[in-house]
Amino acid sequence: MRYWLMKSEPEAYSIDQLAKDKTAPWTGVRNYQARNFMRDQMAIGDKVFFYHSSCDEPGIVGLAEVCKRAYPDETQFDKKSPYYDEKSTRDNPRWLHVDVKFIKKTRTVGLPELRSHEALANMRILARGNRLSITPVDPAEWEFINKLL
């Protein structure tokens, strides 16, 4: 089992929406490294920190779990979607996504709190310039953060 942090802007898709939907496809990822994490490393049962980004209080707001392995992201084929990719074809899709299921909503563990713990100093979300929407989380970091929740 692996652990992940997956970021979403709450206006686009929030932890509350995932709680309502129960499961959801993690669509719209347009970064090759994040896509490769989903394609090559994510497996059913992997645990996820759901992270709200680009909002008043960015931070971890819930827990989810990967419930379906990577498959083509339909938004790449939809000309009306902001995630449309004219170079992608059904025979050779460029973009994939996984499905995640809701586990629970948590208190918000924001960036200042995450940065305040030496045990999390190497966490990728805290790295300068990190803009990835999906990052791996070390098992020790996962355990430490779960104690904060």
Image (cartoon, rainbow, N blue to C red):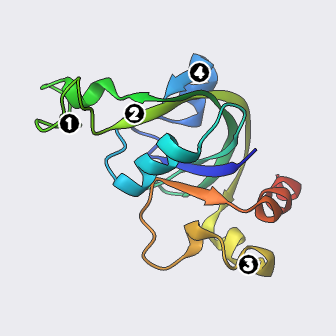
| For marks 4 and 1 on the same chain, the one whose residue lies earlier in the sequence | 4
Which element is circle 1 on?
loop
Disc 1 and disc 2 in contact, CB within 8 angstroms: no
User: Which numbered tag is attached to residue 116?
Assistant: 3
Which element is circle 2 on?
loop
Image spot of residue 99 (x, y percent): 54, 27
Residue indicated by mark 2: 27
Image spot of residue 142 (x, y percent): 78, 57
Task: Using the rendered view, name the quadrant where residue 83 is placed.
Answer: top left
User: Which numbered tag is attached to residue 82?
Assistant: 1
Residue that extends furthest to the right in the rendered view of this protein: 147
| C-alpha separation, residue under disc 2 versus residue under disc 4 | 12 Å
| C-alpha separation, residue under disc 1 versus residue under disc 3 | 36 Å
Foreground residue among 73 and 15:
73
| C-alpha separation, residue under disc 3 versus residue under disc 4 | 32 Å
* Whether residue 85 is situated above or below residue 147 in the rendered picture: above
Q: Residue at x 84, y 62 (%)?
A: 144
> Where does the N terminus fall, quadrant-wise?
top right
Residue indicated by mark 4: 23
Which element is circle 3 on?
loop
| For marks 1 and 2 on the same chain, the one whose residue lies earlier in the sequence | 2
Q: Amino acid at mark 2?
A: Thr
Q: Is residue 146 visible in the rendered structure shown here?
A: yes
| C-alpha separation, residue under disc 3 versus residue under disc 2 | 32 Å
* Whether residue 66 is situated above or below residue 118 in the rendered picture: above
Image spot of residue 65 (x, y percent): 68, 34
Q: Residue at x 27, y 39 (%)?
A: 94
Q: Amino acid at mark 4?
A: Thr
Residue that extends furthest to the front in the rendered view of this protein: 91
Q: Amino acid at mark 3?
A: Ser
Q: Nearer the viewer, mark 3 or mark 4?
A: 4
